[in-house]
Amino acid sequence: MIDFRPFYQQIATSPLSDWLETLPLQIKEWEKQTHGDYAKWSKIIDFLPDLTADTVDLKNAVKCDRTYPLSEGEKQRIIHHLKQLMPWRKGPYHLFGIHVDCEWRSDFKWERVLPHLAPLKDRTILDVGCGSGYHMWRMLGEGAKMVVGIDPTELFLCQFEAVRKLLNNDRRVNLIPLGIEQMQPLAAFDTVFSMGVLYHRKSPLDHLTQLKNQLKKSGELVLETLVVDGDANTVLVPSDRYAKMKNVYFIPSVAALINWLEKVGFTHVRCVDVAPTTVEEQRKTDWLENESLIDFLDPNDPSKTIEGYPAPKRAVILANK
């Protein structure tokens, strides 16, 4: 099973030390009710070989390699183990010559977001709903001091730990299997990211407040979420599913979203990017057995979802505490 004690030791002398009042007990409770496949998934990490990467590039990709390439047999054994952790949603990863071609080209999103951010160098960062952790590694590549991701999905945790093992077991990045609603207000992070989470929340204003409670004074929020066209009063509330997702509750316009952020107390709120989701950014690969974006759109009108709603469009909003 995954050992969180090194993280506890790491934060004991950091601005996150107050988290030790609640986190160890929460993890003990989490361990009592994990997914039935968690034990199997976590063993896969142990099966991966102990390799030392001679080069690690997190600035331009999530990539590692060594001077003497792996044999084809070694590659195939690693691929076999990693494919036991399918589906791989967020990536891509380039690990010792192995291309983990995930459903999402998360590097596309990173390239849209990065130019607008306050410099991440030496920052302590929280990534809410981090998935398997792709963006956390890119944050580290920008010089972050410490990156903590939270995501309650056990499969994502095991994917993250598998990638971490192949990236020389780097401990500056950690994934904690909790939701933000379980976090005590730490007010300790320089930057908080919430990307692809807000529309899954039944109470979006509560989510925005929870994000604010984790930020230091003047800290920066990076919010990326689905939006629709419209004015400050426009909010789409899907009656059942949206793009075949059953847990989509509110999709606001950019103007409505800015209004929400200001209502919960954020300042200097600004939209820095709006872009449609394309079938080049989200698509089927050999690392995903499920459907993907092409299956979620109206085959006769790709400007609409299969249910008839506007096709996915995503905005990046920055704000300060």
Image (cartoon, rainbow, N blue to C red):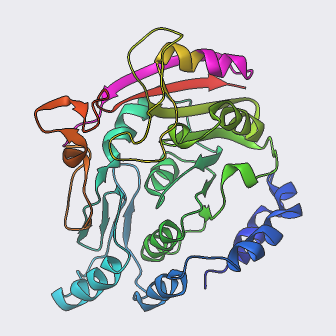
Residue 181 visible to the viewer: yes
Question: Among all residues in the image, which is located at the extreme left?
Answer: 300
Horizontal side, residue 217 vs residue 135: left or right: right
Q: Relative to residue 155, is residue 47 depicted above or below?
A: below
Residue 133 position, x and y percent, is: 48, 58
Magenta span has 244? Answer: no
Which region is colored magenta? 259-279
* Residue at position x 46%, y 28% in the image: 316
Look at 62% across and 76% down and name the residue there: 34
Residue plotted at (20% across, 48% down): 295
With respect to residue 45, does 265 lie above or below?
A: above
User: Quick check: 299 left or right of 249?
Assistant: left
Q: Quadrant of the C terminus?
A: top right
The verdict on residue 275 being magenta is: yes
Instruction: Give the tally of numbered discs.
Output: 0
Residue 172 shows up from this direction: no
Q: Which residue of the protein is positioned furthest toward the top in this rendering?
A: 231
The quarter of the displayed image where residue 118 is located: top right
Quadrant where the N terminus lies?
Answer: bottom right
Q: Looking at the image, is 128 positioned above or below residue 288?
A: above
Instruction: Give how far across and how far down residue 29 sits, in percent.
Output: 76, 74
Could you say where residue 5 lies in the image, as x and y percent from the top left?
74, 77
Q: From the top left corner, tell me how far across and down residue 117 is, in percent.
A: 51, 30
Of 134 and 182, the residue lying toward us: 182
